[in-house]
Image: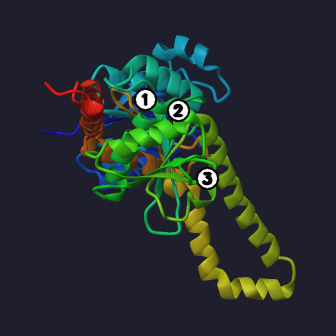
Amino acid sequence: MSLPRIAIDAMGGDEGVRVMVHGAAMARRRHDKFSFLLVGDEAQIKSALEEHPNLRGASEILHCEGVVEGDEKPSRAIRRAKTTSMGLAIEAVKNGDCGAAVSAGNTGALMAMGKIALRTMPGIDRPALAGLMPTLLEDDVVMLDLGANTDCDARNLVQFAIMGAAYSRIVTGKAAPRVRLLNIGTESIKGTDDLRQASQRLQDATGLAMQFDGFIEADKINRGEVDVVVTDGFSGNIALKAIEGSARFVTDLLRTAFTSSLRSKIGFLVSRPATELLKHHLDPNNHNGGVFLGLNGVIVKSHGSANAQGVGNAVDVAARLLEDNITQRIMADLAEVEAEMNGNAQGASSPDAGGGPSK
């Protein structure tokens, strides 16, 4: 059975059509069973495809002149969905023509159009934006939500944990990823009522394919001690930007230090292999590809400033999610939680529960 094809919003992103097409071509070398629908200006796409015959033979072009602008309000983008490359890429997933859509365009518009067109999966109240971040160890850490939902209750956080664990199993290959809730401390009494309730529900759900052990503080996110970090979109977006800003601060500080004197420049030459490794590890292109989890279809968000390698990594994410049936994995885990919660509720209401009289 052939895999569903991937729709590419060729007009999204800061670097233009050539970078989007180049990235898709790089991804196809690693996932040669996939075909692609390239949505955007036909003349520009055809010109870019001349440099990538491996992609040209596996692609169809859907001509579209409309583009969602980077500063466009989601409400306006929704009204123009049928006439923009982003909207038509999502529409291709909705009508079953493609299994996933990848865009480097306006995040708010992509989220809004995706939610309206695809709707949330059964058992999911809200979709969440999940991303990959580097750690001190080999595997990246999955973090969600990164901005789709600013206010979340305990039920939302439990659903995010289930979706994040399913995503982590695909990207890390671990059968039971380590999952933690982001909090201001690791003690069970810390945090909001919703955080403590979510923690208890996850601890009670013993049948899930994850290792859940309470809370994690923000300074441990990138240590490699956890595979999935779960939080609301408000805190998650702040944490993400703080981590990205710290990475840029470190690289800029090193650049300044190594150019401050002749001795420093000599020191740079000696330590260049280490600094190149650091640069590679912190490069956002190597961890590119945010996913809107919880929708009836796969939507992957690439950084707007991503280069071809970054776009290729985002397309890789879409391909791997389709290959490993992310939707089915999430639905199976949701059913497990619902069954355990219903069983606990029935046990608590039973006449025999709590030492009550038996029949």
Residue topped by disc 3: 185
Using a 10 Å C-alpha cutoff, classify the residue at mark 1 as few (fewer than 14 neighbours), some (14 to 19) or many (20 or more): many
Is residue 74 placed above or below 179 in the rendered structure?
Answer: above
Q: Is residue 129 left or right of residue 272?
A: left
Picture coordinates of residue 44 (x, y %)? 50, 34
Give the distance between the C-alpha atoms of the residues marked 2 and 3, in whole angstroms.
43 Å
Is residue 257 placed above or below 90 in the rendered structure?
Answer: below
Q: Is residue 109 left or right of residue 265?
A: left
Is residue 268 placed above or below 226 in the rendered structure?
Answer: below
Residue topped by disc 1: 39
Residue topped by disc 2: 11
Picture coordinates of residue 358 (x, y %)? 17, 28
Q: Depth check: 202 or 143 in front?
A: 202
Q: Depth check: 100 or 327 in front?
A: 327
Mark found first going from the N terminus, 1 or 3: 1
Amino acid type shown at disc 1:
Val
Picture coordinates of residue 219 (x, y %)? 63, 59
**Cβ–Cβ below 8 Å for labels 2 and 1?**
yes
**Camera sees residue 63:** no
